[in-house]
Amino acid sequence: MSNEDLMRKIEIIRNKMISVGMAEGFTSPNTIQLSQTLDKLINLKMIS
């Protein structure tokens, strides 16, 4: 995955996490799952 693709995916997941968090609550399972996915993507970005 290119750096540009990774940044795009991070932004998409971040926006989705915020939307889900606002709708379902910041401790909902869906929000937490998106947060964990976002963490993994950010970690990938940091090591690349």
Image (tube, rainbow, N blue to C red):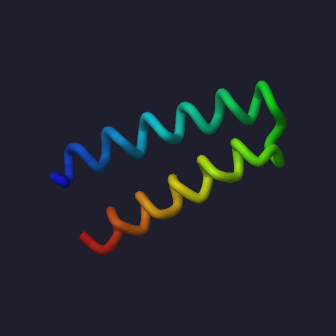
Q: Position of residue 30 (x, y in %)?
A: 70, 42
**In the shown orientation, is residue 35 left or right of residue 32?**
left
Q: Position of residue 42 (x, y in %)?
A: 43, 60
Q: Residue at x 78, y 25 (%)?
A: 23
**19 is higher (above) or lower (below) than 42:** above
- In this view, which residue lies farthest toward the left? 2
- Picture quarter containing residue 21? top right
Q: Which quarter of the rendered picture does the C terminus lie within? A: bottom left
Q: Residue at x 42, y 68 (%)?
A: 43
**In the shown orientation, is residue 9 left or right of residue 4?**
right
**47 is higher (above) or lower (below) than 30:** below
Q: Which quarter of the rendered picture does the N terminus lie within? A: bottom left
- Picture quarter containing residue 9? top left
Q: Position of residue 16 (x, y in %)?
A: 56, 32
Q: Residue at x 42, y 38 (%)?
A: 11
Please state the total of marks drawn on the protein image: 0
- Picture quarter containing residue 24? top right
**27 is higher (above) or lower (below) than 18:** below
Q: Residue at x 83, y 48 (%)?
A: 27
Closer to the camera in the image, 24 or 18: 24
**In the shown orientation, is residue 3 left or right of residue 22?**
left
- In this view, which residue lies farthest toward the bottom? 47
